Amino acid sequence: MNKLESAIESILFVASKPLTAAGIAKILEADRGEVAAALKNIAAQHRETGIVLLEAEDAFQFATNSANSTEVKSFLNAELREKLTDATVETLAIIAYRQPIARSEIEAIRGVNCQYAIRHLMIRGMIQKVPNPNDGRQNLYEVTHEFLQHLGIQSISDLPDFQTLVEKIKLPETPESAAHAANQPAETKPGDIEAEENSQS
Protein backbone atom coordinates (compact mmCIF):
# COMPACT_ATOMS: atom_id res chain seq x y z
CA MET A 1 0.00 0.00 0.00
CA ASN A 2 1.44 3.38 -1.01
CA LYS A 3 1.30 6.68 0.84
CA LEU A 4 -1.78 7.93 -1.06
CA GLU A 5 -3.80 4.80 -0.28
CA SER A 6 -2.72 4.96 3.37
CA ALA A 7 -3.82 8.59 3.63
CA ILE A 8 -7.17 7.85 1.99
CA GLU A 9 -7.80 4.96 4.40
CA SER A 10 -7.11 7.19 7.39
CA ILE A 11 -9.46 9.90 6.12
CA LEU A 12 -12.26 7.42 5.39
CA PHE A 13 -11.81 5.85 8.81
CA VAL A 14 -12.38 9.11 10.71
CA ALA A 15 -15.03 10.51 8.32
CA SER A 16 -18.55 10.61 9.73
CA LYS A 17 -20.16 10.56 6.28
CA PRO A 18 -19.45 9.19 2.77
CA LEU A 19 -16.77 11.07 0.80
CA THR A 20 -16.47 11.48 -2.94
CA ALA A 21 -13.28 10.89 -4.89
CA ALA A 22 -13.28 14.57 -5.83
CA GLY A 23 -13.64 15.59 -2.20
CA ILE A 24 -10.78 13.34 -1.11
CA ALA A 25 -8.60 14.60 -3.95
CA LYS A 26 -9.23 18.18 -2.85
CA ILE A 27 -8.35 17.41 0.77
CA LEU A 28 -5.12 15.65 -0.19
CA GLU A 29 -4.33 18.03 -3.06
CA ALA A 30 -3.96 14.96 -5.27
CA ASP A 31 -4.99 14.07 -8.79
CA ARG A 32 -8.59 12.84 -8.94
CA GLY A 33 -7.67 9.99 -11.27
CA GLU A 34 -5.00 8.77 -8.88
CA VAL A 35 -7.45 8.96 -5.97
CA ALA A 36 -10.04 6.98 -7.94
CA ALA A 37 -7.45 4.29 -8.73
CA ALA A 38 -6.36 4.20 -5.09
CA LEU A 39 -9.97 3.75 -3.96
CA LYS A 40 -10.34 0.76 -6.27
CA ASN A 41 -7.22 -0.82 -4.81
CA ILE A 42 -8.42 -0.18 -1.26
CA ALA A 43 -11.80 -1.75 -2.06
CA ALA A 44 -10.10 -4.83 -3.51
CA GLN A 45 -7.79 -5.20 -0.51
CA HIS A 46 -10.70 -5.05 1.95
CA ARG A 47 -13.14 -7.22 0.00
CA GLU A 48 -12.66 -10.28 2.23
CA THR A 49 -11.93 -8.50 5.52
CA GLY A 50 -14.20 -7.45 8.36
CA ILE A 51 -14.22 -3.85 7.08
CA VAL A 52 -15.26 -3.21 3.49
CA LEU A 53 -15.33 -0.09 1.33
CA LEU A 54 -18.82 0.78 0.12
CA GLU A 55 -19.48 2.93 -2.93
CA ALA A 56 -22.77 4.64 -3.78
CA GLU A 57 -23.21 7.50 -6.23
CA ASP A 58 -19.45 8.13 -6.37
CA ALA A 59 -19.28 8.38 -2.58
CA PHE A 60 -17.17 6.03 -0.46
CA GLN A 61 -17.43 4.92 3.16
CA PHE A 62 -16.00 2.16 5.33
CA ALA A 63 -18.56 -0.27 6.78
CA THR A 64 -18.63 -3.65 8.48
CA ASN A 65 -18.78 -6.71 6.27
CA SER A 66 -22.40 -7.86 5.84
CA ALA A 67 -21.24 -11.44 6.43
CA ASN A 68 -20.69 -10.46 10.08
CA SER A 69 -24.02 -8.65 10.53
CA THR A 70 -25.32 -11.07 13.20
CA GLU A 71 -22.24 -10.68 15.38
CA VAL A 72 -22.16 -6.91 14.92
CA LYS A 73 -25.85 -6.56 15.86
CA SER A 74 -25.33 -8.66 19.00
CA PHE A 75 -22.39 -6.49 20.04
CA LEU A 76 -24.19 -3.21 19.40
CA ASN A 77 -27.33 -4.30 21.24
CA ALA A 78 -25.29 -5.44 24.26
CA GLU A 79 -23.25 -2.23 24.23
CA LEU A 80 -26.34 -0.05 24.00
CA ARG A 81 -28.09 -1.82 26.88
CA GLU A 82 -24.97 -1.88 29.07
CA LYS A 83 -24.35 1.85 28.90
CA LEU A 84 -27.95 3.01 29.38
CA THR A 85 -29.73 3.08 32.72
CA ASP A 86 -33.18 1.55 33.10
CA ALA A 87 -34.71 5.03 33.25
CA THR A 88 -32.98 6.04 30.03
CA VAL A 89 -34.05 2.84 28.28
CA GLU A 90 -37.67 3.46 29.34
CA THR A 91 -37.51 7.00 27.96
CA LEU A 92 -35.99 5.74 24.71
CA ALA A 93 -38.72 3.10 24.35
CA ILE A 94 -41.46 5.70 24.85
CA ILE A 95 -39.95 7.95 22.20
CA ALA A 96 -39.50 5.06 19.76
CA TYR A 97 -43.12 3.93 20.02
CA ARG A 98 -44.80 7.33 20.41
CA GLN A 99 -42.63 9.60 18.27
CA PRO A 100 -42.66 12.43 17.58
CA ILE A 101 -43.42 13.20 21.21
CA ALA A 102 -43.00 16.19 23.51
CA ARG A 103 -41.02 16.07 26.74
CA SER A 104 -44.17 16.84 28.74
CA GLU A 105 -45.86 13.78 27.26
CA ILE A 106 -42.86 11.58 28.09
CA GLU A 107 -42.87 12.81 31.67
CA ALA A 108 -46.63 12.27 31.94
CA ILE A 109 -46.18 8.64 30.90
CA ARG A 110 -43.19 7.97 33.19
CA GLY A 111 -44.41 10.14 36.05
CA VAL A 112 -40.97 11.65 36.66
CA ASN A 113 -38.72 14.37 35.29
CA CYS A 114 -36.96 13.09 32.17
CA GLN A 115 -34.53 15.95 31.56
CA TYR A 116 -31.42 13.88 32.37
CA ALA A 117 -32.54 10.86 30.34
CA ILE A 118 -33.36 12.99 27.30
CA ARG A 119 -30.06 14.88 27.56
CA HIS A 120 -28.12 11.60 27.81
CA LEU A 121 -29.92 10.14 24.78
CA MET A 122 -29.23 13.32 22.80
CA ILE A 123 -25.52 13.12 23.65
CA ARG A 124 -25.45 9.46 22.62
CA GLY A 125 -27.10 10.37 19.32
CA MET A 126 -30.05 8.05 20.00
CA ILE A 127 -32.71 10.77 19.69
CA GLN A 128 -33.03 14.16 18.04
CA LYS A 129 -35.19 17.26 18.27
CA VAL A 130 -37.72 18.07 15.57
CA PRO A 131 -39.96 21.15 15.28
CA ASN A 132 -43.49 20.91 16.62
CA PRO A 133 -45.80 21.81 13.71
CA ASN A 134 -48.50 22.87 16.17
CA ASP A 135 -46.34 24.95 18.51
CA GLY A 136 -43.22 26.77 17.32
CA ARG A 137 -42.10 27.26 20.93
CA GLN A 138 -41.88 23.55 21.64
CA ASN A 139 -39.68 20.76 20.28
CA LEU A 140 -40.62 17.14 19.80
CA TYR A 141 -38.32 14.12 20.03
CA GLU A 142 -37.79 11.15 17.75
CA VAL A 143 -35.18 8.41 17.39
CA THR A 144 -32.26 8.74 14.98
CA HIS A 145 -30.81 6.52 12.27
CA GLU A 146 -28.03 5.67 14.72
CA PHE A 147 -30.64 4.19 17.06
CA LEU A 148 -31.96 2.03 14.22
CA GLN A 149 -28.41 0.93 13.40
CA HIS A 150 -27.83 -0.09 17.02
CA LEU A 151 -30.89 -2.34 16.87
CA GLY A 152 -30.02 -3.61 13.41
CA ILE A 153 -33.34 -2.52 11.85
CA GLN A 154 -34.19 -0.39 8.83
CA SER A 155 -37.13 1.63 10.19
CA ILE A 156 -39.42 2.09 13.18
CA SER A 157 -41.96 -0.19 11.52
CA ASP A 158 -39.52 -3.07 12.14
CA LEU A 159 -39.92 -2.73 15.91
CA PRO A 160 -41.98 -5.46 17.62
CA ASP A 161 -45.70 -4.70 17.83
CA PHE A 162 -46.24 -2.84 21.11
CA GLN A 163 -49.44 -4.63 22.15
CA THR A 164 -47.96 -8.03 21.38
CA LEU A 165 -44.86 -7.10 23.35
CA VAL A 166 -46.88 -6.00 26.39
CA GLU A 167 -49.00 -9.16 26.37
CA LYS A 168 -45.84 -11.24 26.73
CA ILE A 169 -44.72 -9.33 29.82
CA LYS A 170 -45.88 -10.73 33.18
CA LEU A 171 -45.61 -8.09 35.87
CA PRO A 172 -44.24 -9.28 39.23
CA GLU A 173 -46.68 -9.43 42.14
CA THR A 174 -46.06 -6.64 44.64
CA PRO A 175 -46.64 -6.98 48.42
CA GLU A 176 -49.53 -4.51 48.11
CA SER A 177 -51.29 -6.53 45.42
CA ALA A 178 -50.79 -9.76 47.37
CA ALA A 179 -52.24 -8.21 50.53
CA HIS A 180 -55.17 -6.82 48.58
CA ALA A 181 -55.90 -10.26 47.11
CA ALA A 182 -55.71 -11.85 50.58
CA ASN A 183 -58.26 -9.39 52.00
CA GLN A 184 -60.76 -10.00 49.19
CA PRO A 185 -63.64 -12.34 50.09
CA ALA A 186 -63.53 -15.71 48.40
CA GLU A 187 -65.83 -16.26 45.46
CA THR A 188 -69.22 -17.51 46.68
CA LYS A 189 -71.17 -20.06 44.69
CA PRO A 190 -74.97 -20.58 44.88
CA GLY A 191 -74.45 -23.98 46.54
CA ASP A 192 -72.34 -22.39 49.27
CA ILE A 193 -75.10 -19.89 50.08
CA GLU A 194 -77.70 -22.67 50.33
CA ALA A 195 -75.46 -24.73 52.62
CA GLU A 196 -74.86 -21.74 54.88
CA GLU A 197 -78.61 -20.99 55.16
CA ASN A 198 -79.38 -24.63 56.07
CA SER A 199 -76.76 -24.59 58.79
CA GLN A 200 -78.25 -21.45 60.33
CA SER A 201 -81.83 -22.75 60.31
Image (cartoon, rainbow, N blue to C red):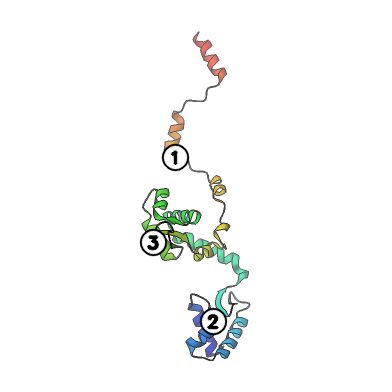
Identify the residue at image location x=52%, y=90%.
Answer: 3
Q: Which residue is mark 3?
A: 119
> Which amino acid type is marked by label 1?
Thr
Image coordinates for residue 161, horizontal then vertical, percent: 57, 51
CA gap between label 3 and label 2 equals 34 Å
| Callout in the foreground (3, 1) | 3
> Whole-Å distance between the Cαs marked 3 and 1?
32 Å
Residue positioned most to the top:
201
| Label 1 SS | loop
- Relative to 95, is 27 above or below? below
The amino acid type, in three-letter code, at marker 2 is Thr
Given this view, does label 3 or label 2 mark the residue nearer the observer? 2
Q: Amino acid at mark 3?
A: Arg
Q: Quadrant of residue 129?
A: bottom left
Mark 2, Cα crowd under 10 Å, few <14 / some 14-19 / many 20+, is some
Q: Nearer the viewer, residue 115 or 138?
A: 138
Q: Residue at x 42, y 52 (%)?
A: 106
How far apart marks 2 and 1 lie (CA) works out to: 59 Å
Work out whether residue 8 or residue 133 is closer to the camera in this orientation and state it: 133
Q: Give coordinates of residue 132: x percent, y percent.
A: 42, 59
6 relative position to 110: left or right: right
Mark on residue 174? 1
- Whether the residues at callouts 3 and 2 have beta carbons within 8 Å, the answer is no
What is the quadrant of residue 120 in the picture?
bottom left
Q: Position of residue 115 (x, y in %)?
A: 36, 57
Q: Secondary structure at mark 3?
A: helix
